[in-house]
Amino acid sequence: MHKIERIAIAGVPNSGKTTLFNSLTGARQKVGNWPGVTVEKIEGSFPLKNTRVELVDLPGTYNLSPDTEDQKVAERVISSGEYDLILNVVDATNLSRNLYLTMDLKERTNQIIVLLNMTDVAEKEGIKIDIDRLSHDLEVPVVPIVAVDKTSVKGAIEQIESLIEGLPPHDSHVSKQEVMDTVKKYSHIDEIYGRVAREIKDRSTNFTNRVDNVVMNRFAAIPIFLASMFVTFWFAIGLGSVFIDFFDIIGGLLFVDIPSSLLNAVGSPEWLVVMVAGVGAGVQTVATFVPVVFFMFLALGILEDLGYMARAGVVADRFMRKIGLPGSAFIPMIVGFGCTVPAVMAARTMSTKRDRFMTIFMAPFMSCGARLPVYALFCAALFGAYSGLAVFLIYLAGLFMAILTGYFLKNTLFKGTPSNFVMDLPLYHAPRAGAVLKSAWLRLRSFIKRAGTIVVAAVFVLSMLNSIGYEGGKISFGNEDSQSSVLAYAGKSIGPIFKPIGITEENWPASVALFTGLFAKEAIVGTVNALYAANDMTGATEAGAKEEAGALDVGGAITEAFTTVGEGFVGVISSFDLLGLGLISEDQATISEEIGADGSVYQHIAANFTVFSAFAYLLFVLMYFPCLAVIGAARQEMGGYYAGVMVVYSTLLAWAVATLFYQVAEGHSIFYIMLSLVMLLAIYGWLHLLGKKEKDEVAAVAPPPVINNCA
Amino acid sequence: MASTKNLAEISKGKSYEVAGFTSETSDYAEKLYKMGFVKGTPVELAPVKISDPMVVQIRGSRIALRKKEAQEILVREVGDA
């Protein structure tokens, strides 16, 4: 008698294994990572023979050779014997290529049941499969299933329950002697396929092929692609933004204002109030990203489920390959113009680690919506009628830096990793609302849990530094955006670093603002606004800082929160200006009202910057370390090491490029020009060394690949 | 032996079979091998009007490949062997 406690589902991508997993486990799921790698691990449980058994969804793979991270994970899990049974989901519409994985699985365990999925679609497509024969030839039990149909899944569970009894005793060595090479496996598959599958009608006129003829038509392909990208962007950024202010206001109310008021009411010491508010501010920051991340995953889920994602990758490949990335990298890049956080997360749709990581490194160079207010403010102050052009140049500079980054990485950190484009085009089918919503929700939850915790911690620390002031032997709180906070002190003392980009020592508010930019890039606006004003009339800061700490107005905040949703909806429907580029104008009053800055800020900026130093500053703002939420997301997707490399890389690059620009344009210091060029070379060299180190480590760990494709 | 050409050169409406790779040991060959591009497997151009990446039909599924990379795959026209 077999005791089954843990079951793993294996299958090729698009075989419907995740659908089956959802049908089996219902709401009981948790998303995490496989130990040591950034491959998603989805676990759940379901009732089998009146006991709950653990179920894990293995990454979708075509085979078990350790070529990719996903395959390595699947191989390790199956060979480990940790799971008592492997359910191998096989797509009946694509039998011959799906069976290759089955062959690989059979070499590693004899505890397999094949679930033949989409037999209904296969028949519509023109293929009829003899299930008994297939089971006989594979020497593995085969259960037909329609994973989207609850009744079918229920019937399959009953069949599995009875089949478990008939499985051979577990023996991990059983098939060691039968290891076949690729050619043998395929000829074996071809024999089986010939016996079990019958083509009952011509497949060339089926629905998928007809749609492909339109979607991948020479003339229609690009317009359809652009339209679908626009809808994706609208969905993720436009619709997501509608709720950003709502989450921001409600989050501020729930996690900052209410707790602070309560603590104040019971007479808690100030340090406690500040600390609680600091944690609250972190939670609030994560909350503001909830809508965009959710809508982005929803949009990606729909494209994926529909089957269009793969086609979009094909259409975009023509131009994306020029920068060394596959077509599928287009989506993260375009989403990056809205918000870098969902862009970083969207990179996980790519199949290889190299492509994924390169895209994540490049995505922050797309100017996100939070950087635009900074550009708009500075450009309006100094560029007058040329504001629009100046902002456009910054956007362009970002694109150029992304391409440069791709070039750097390709030749250093990810050198030697082959990049080729092989894209499977799945069948089209209607997206299933339940499944798509659920997977978006699960991914959001994992973002909140995994990226969220680090963001909360970092925002807390930064809030503390921003609040705590030390003067005359006395520690004080509530020094946000004033010159007495620790953060301002730190900003002032590292001021000289920014001298080469044209920030004078008297212009310290500009360097302090770079640190508050860690919260979110648009915070730079608030900080320079407050600090310039404070610098102007010392003592007025207190009033400004205390303004926020006014009476708690719960009703007012909630009304405001809902109003923003209403206004946002009107805005997103009535206007196609998804980037918010309408913000750029020469009318300073309009901009300052829109972004909440004082009218006097323009004089301060004009007094403290020249045209060239302002542009250099904006270049730096474009490129330097991304905001904490992005760092959190990057850490979730790539691990702490690569996220760290990314932060250091982008900051050094920002400094080198901003310095080079300023010194060539205005500073004319040969020393600094040389220094920035040396810096660029040093960055390249550093990445090169990291790449070499990585390669040596990989070589030391992994055995040389076994080539067995001699025919 | 019939003349072999590479996959990027195949024309619509004709039937081919995989004949091998220009470099049997490349990572690319290894990857495609496991996807079913083994010697003797029938392959043909999918009737879509996008040419690069090109779309081929093999083993009942459609796979998109870059034209330049597809040059590594050798094919033989079926019927003239």
Image (cartoon, coloured by chain):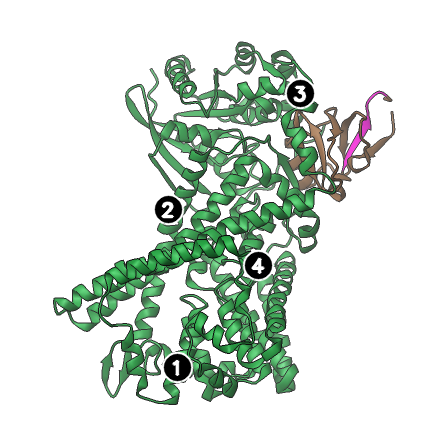
Marks 2,1: beta carbons within 8 A: no
Q: Which residues are magenta?
A: B73-79
Q: Along the line of sight, which residue is nearer the eye, B43 or A34? A: B43
Q: Residue furthest left?
A: A266
**Labels 1, 4: front one:** 1
Distance between the alpha carbons at the discs numbered 2 and 1:
37 Å
Host chain of mark 4: A
Instruction: Pinpoint residue A560: horizontal percent, then vertical percent.
Output: 33, 61
The residue at which mark 4 appears reads as A362
Chain B rendering hue: brown
Dominant SS of magenta comes to strand
The answer to the question of whether label 4 and label 3 lie on touching residues, with beta carbons closer than 8 A, is: no
Mark 3 neighbour class, 10 Å CA radius: few under 14, some 14 to 19, many 20 or more: some
**Mark 4 closeness class: few <14, some 14–19, many ≥20 residues within 10 Å:** many
Gap between marks 2 and 4, in whole Å? Answer: 25 Å
Residue ID for mark 2: A445
Q: Which residue is located at x 62 percent, y 35 percent? A: A424
